[in-house]
Amino acid sequence: MLIQEFISKEISAEVNEVSFSWESPSNIALVKYWGKNLDQTPKNPSISFTLSDCKTTTSVLFKKIKNTSKIIDFELFFEGERNISFRTKIEKFFSTIVAYCPFLLNYHLTISSSNSFPHSSGIASSASAMSALSLCIMSLEKELTLIDDEFFYKKASFISRIGSGSACRSIYGGINFWGTHSDFSFGSDLYSTQISKSISSKFHNYRDAILIIDEGKKEVSSSVGHELMNDNPFSQIRFKLAKNNISKLMKILESGNLNEFCNLVESEALMLHSLMMSSTPSYVLMKPATLSVINLIREFRKDSNIPVCFTLDAGANVHILFPENFSQEVINFIKKKLSVFCVKQKYILDFIGTGPKQI
Ligand code: DP6
């Protein structure tokens, strides 16, 4: 079923050739999206921090053509080289969004993309990649039709979600909510919304240090992981717990209780991985080093009283979240005790960012 609101309006301008470039960041979920419906809507709501330096830069050159087929004509370059491996994902994305952006059929698209971080390293590259591409498409829509900024970003989030669920949360900076929940009158399963209500200043400039524990391609993709939730014996209880955790997290974000924040965020990360372990077939994405790091972070928190905690995506890498004012202590701890567990001692120091930028 098509969502009428997002079908592009009548074309009111003639554009023969134009190029747009956007930088869009990755995001890290605090309450995780895990399990989805066939229409790419989530089984439970999620909340994330938008990152800053972990980002994808995408440029799209749109050239007018006479296309009589119903397929969007494009070529793809990744890190400067023609790319085939992402083509299927983009073809699938285009086959759905063409109903919302039919003007794309009149153009040949040359898409050039690069990441600031290693691809498939467990950093959500699909989130930054799909949001950057969606923003370029929306820039063309804005050139061709009359839309305001609010709709521009809302539809960018809407089409990003079709490309990759978590991508819809990368369209805005700060803290983002995606899904429906009784605590949020504005929430939607179709796009995400920035949480602008009173967030404690303790979360301003919050840091995320990403330890690269494993650079290899994930053994089980997120798409397969989501699908396995359909038959997971714990899925219903998980969806209920995720909703409860959204309510709890909102209170924590307002109160600034960082001890409660650490407990909730870590429990969400471990629950995500326990769902992978209890799927059929079961699988484990954590590595021995992931567990060593987790234990050391908990020990450090106990000994230092610094509210530092970990979270995990669908991969082995560890995201370490901490308030900016403890940066020196935490970065020293990472250098001395944790970097030995990282591939070539690699870690990325990032923080909550302000969202995508047109360049
Ligand atoms: C564990 O958004 O990558 O990172 O919708 O199939 O593209 P698709 O999945 P994806 O799933 C991300 C899952 C997660 C948790 C989260 O980001 O909320």
Image (tube, rainbow, N blue to C red):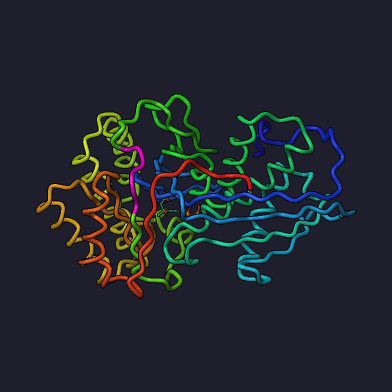
Residue 246, percent across and down?
A: 33, 36
Decide whether residue 187 is among the magenta residues.
no
Q: Residue at x 78, y 59 (%)?
A: 73
| 307 sits left or right of 82 in the view | left
Decide whether residue 207 is among the magenta residues.
yes
Q: Nearer the viewer, residue 156 or 329?
A: 329
Residue 173, percent across and down?
A: 47, 40
Q: Residue at x 49, y 34 (%)?
A: 193
Give the residue at the far left of this rendering.
Answer: 303
| Quadrant (top left, top right, bottom left, bottom right) of the N terminus | top right
Residue 29, percent across and down?
A: 38, 47
- Using the rendered view, name the quadrant where residue 49 is placed: top left
| 31 sits left or right of 42 in the view | left
Q: Residue at x 52, y 57 (%)?
A: 126
Residue 357, percent across and down?
A: 58, 44
Q: Residue at x 57, y 55 (%)?
A: 129
| 105 sits left or right of 290 in the view | right
- Using the rendered view, name the quadrant where residue 87 is placed: bottom right
Q: Is residue 310 above or below residue 243?
A: below
Q: Is residue 46 above or below residue 277?
A: above
Q: Is residue 287 above or below residue 279?
A: below
Give the residue at the far front of this rendering.
Answer: 328
Give the residue at the far right of this rendering.
Answer: 66
Q: Which residues are magenta?
A: 203-208
| 184 sits left or right of 129 in the view | left
